[in-house]
Image: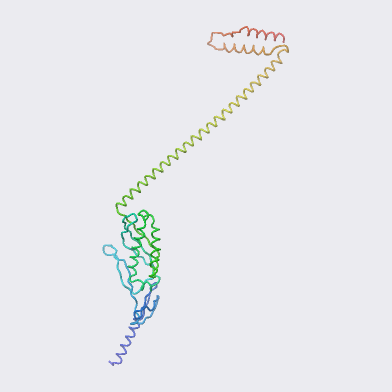
Amino acid sequence: MNPVIVILILVALFVVVFAAAGIRIVQQSQTMIIERLGKYHRTLTSGFNIIIPLFDRPRQITWRYVREDYDGRSLVVFKTKDRIDLRETVYDFPRQNVITKDNVGTEINALLYFQIMDPVKAVYEIENLPNAIEKLTQTTLRNVIGEMDLDDSLSSRDTINSKLRIILDDATNKWGVKVNRVELQDINPPKDIRDAMEKQMRAERDRRAKILEAEGLKQAQILEAQGYKESQISRAEGEKKSAILRAEGEAESRIKVAQAEAEAVHKIKDAVAKDGDPIQYMVAIKYIETLQNMVSGEDTKTVYMPYEATGVLSAIGGIKELLQQK
């Protein structure tokens, strides 16, 4: 074969290989940091890009992955790659022991949601970004939990999450990272502490139940007393009105009787002669009615006479004289 043709073929192959080595296709939400002769040159965007081989080289970055082994255990694996993912990333940190303000050791694991906003800073401002974020999260979590009691740490997850997010976001801003959320997954105190807390919770529930029962009994007694009081008041008011009505009835009855007697006296006076004495007539009638009532019993054999029988006879005589005069 002609040497010129061989050289041309080799040159063509070199050009093809050189051109292929200079083509970089970057996927959506990814980027690449290109260095020229060891110095930062430019950042590749998603799509088709061309670099100069031998002079331009992608900068490698270490990334953290979580894998499961055959036993189902989670393993953290660090890999080096030349592409930076700009999507939000979730880091699941393993359990760690922290000590609360009241000296209680507990296990806590957390989830961290962050996103790379400036790839240049993420590459050049920190040597191993995932490892740095993990260690920073662990130390910050120890500091935040160390300022709180165990009861506060169990009941204030939102507060802890907010404090962690603010501190981590401020610390990772230099690295071109935005911390979006921090979530505590589990807070596991020691078993003896959990048993004591369970007993305390059970005692508290029993106390609340007894308080509610006592409050219900108290309210029932109060309502019963109020009902008895109102019933007594209503009964007293009824008796009062009844007594008033009876008194008014008796008063009207006596008035009617007195009016009737007055009319009877007037009629008797009109019927008796002008020179007669109506008083004497009335006294005689009363004596006769009294004698009639005294002897009205069927089983009574004794006849009672008033002490002044002559008064009765004189009253009868007076009636006779009145009739004779009439």
Image: 305 above or below 245:
above
Extreme-right residue of the structure: 274
Q: Position of residue 186 (x, y in %)?
A: 34, 58
The count of marks equals 0
The front one of 146 and 317 is 146
The front one of 28 and 187 is 187
Image: 63 above or below 245:
below
| Colouring method of the image | rainbow
Quadrant of the drawing holding the C terminus: top right
Extreme-left residue of the structure: 71
Image: 200 above or below 246:
below
Quadrant of the drawing holding the N terminus: bottom left
Q: Position of residue 166 (x, y in %)?
A: 40, 63
Place residue 164 in its image quadrant.
Answer: bottom left
Q: Position of residue 201 (x, y in %)?
A: 35, 49
Image: 247 above or below 200:
above
Q: Position of residue 107 (x, y in %)?
A: 31, 58
The front one of 107 and 263 is 107
Place residue 188 in its image quadrant.
Answer: bottom left
Q: Is residue 301 left or right of residue 163?
A: right
